[in-house]
Amino acid sequence: MAGAPERRGRDGARTRLRIEEAALRLFAARGVAGTSVRDIAEAVGVSEGALYRHFASKEELARALFLDRYAVLAQSIREIGQIHRDLPSRLAAMVRLGCTLFDEEPALFAYLLINQHDHLSHVPDDPACNAVAALAELLSDSAADLPQPPALAAAMMLGLLVQPAAFALYGRLEGPLSRHAPVITEGVLRLCMPTGIAER
C-alpha cells in the first residue's frame, strides 16, 4: 500500500501527457474552437471529469500546451548558440531546427504557428521560454556581423522559414520541408549577413 500513491502519481503524469498529446493533434487539425473537451477525452479514453482533474478548462490546456512547447523550442534555439559560434553556422542550424520540427512533429509546428496570436502576449520576454527572444539573443551575440538590428533580423529570418512551412502545411509546397532547407538557408544568409560575406 505504501507504493500506491507513487504509482497514482506516475499514472497521473502519464494521463496528463496523453491528454496533451491528443489535444495537440486535435487542436492542430481542427483548431481550439473546433475541438471540444469531449473530443479530447474520447481521444485519450478517459472521462471528461478525469480531464478536468488535470486542466480547469480547454483554454487552460491550450495555453499550457503553447507555453510549454514554446519554451522547449526556445531552449533548442539557445543550444544552437552554445554549439555554433559563428553566424553562418548558427543561421544554418536554425533553419535545420525549424525544418526538422516541421517534418518530425507537424502537429506541434502547426499548433504553434496557427495559435501563436492567442498566446504570445502571455509568453514572458525571457529567452529561456520565449523562442523569438531566444532567436534575437542568438543573433545579438553576432550583432557585429548583422547588417540590421537583431530583432529585425530575427523577424525577417522567421518569415523566410515560417512562410514556406505554411505553404507546405496547406499543400502548396511539396515536402518534406527539409528538402528545401538549403535554399531557405541561402536566403537567410543573404538576408542576415553583410553582402560580401554572404556571397563567399
Image (tube, rainbow, N blue to C red):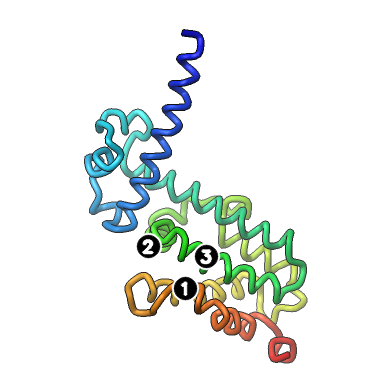
Real-space Cα separation, disc 2 to disc 3, in angstroms: 18 Å
Label 2 with label 3: CB-CB less than 8 Å: no
* Vertical position of residue 198 compared to residue 78: above or below: below
Q: Looking at the rendering, which quadrant does residue 112 occupy?
A: bottom left
Q: Nearer the viewer, mark 2 or mark 3?
A: 3
In the image, residue 180 lies at what x, y percent?
50, 79
Residue at image mark 1: 177
Residue type pointed to by label 2: Ile
Tag shown at residue 100: 3
Q: Looking at the rendering, which quadrant does residue 82 occupy?
A: bottom right
Residue 65 vs residue 7, the one in the foreground: 7
* Vertical position of residue 70 compared to residue 183: above or below: above
In the image, residue 125 lies at what x, y percent?
58, 54
In the image, residue 1 lies at what x, y percent?
46, 8
Q: Earlier in the sequence, mark 2 or mark 3?
A: 3
Real-space Cα separation, disc 1 to disc 3, in angstroms: 8 Å
Helix, strand or loop at disc 2?
A: helix
Q: Earlier in the sequence, mark 1 or mark 3?
A: 3
Badge 1 density bin: few <14, some 14–19, many ≥20, Cα 10 Å: many
Label 1 with label 2: CB-CB less than 8 Å: no
Tag shown at residue 114: 2
Residue type pointed to by label 1: Leu
Residue 104 vs residue 199, the one in the foreground: 104
Badge 3 density bin: few <14, some 14–19, many ≥20, Cα 10 Å: some
* Vertical position of residue 117 compared to residue 187: above or below: above
Real-space Cα separation, disc 1 to disc 2, in angstroms: 17 Å
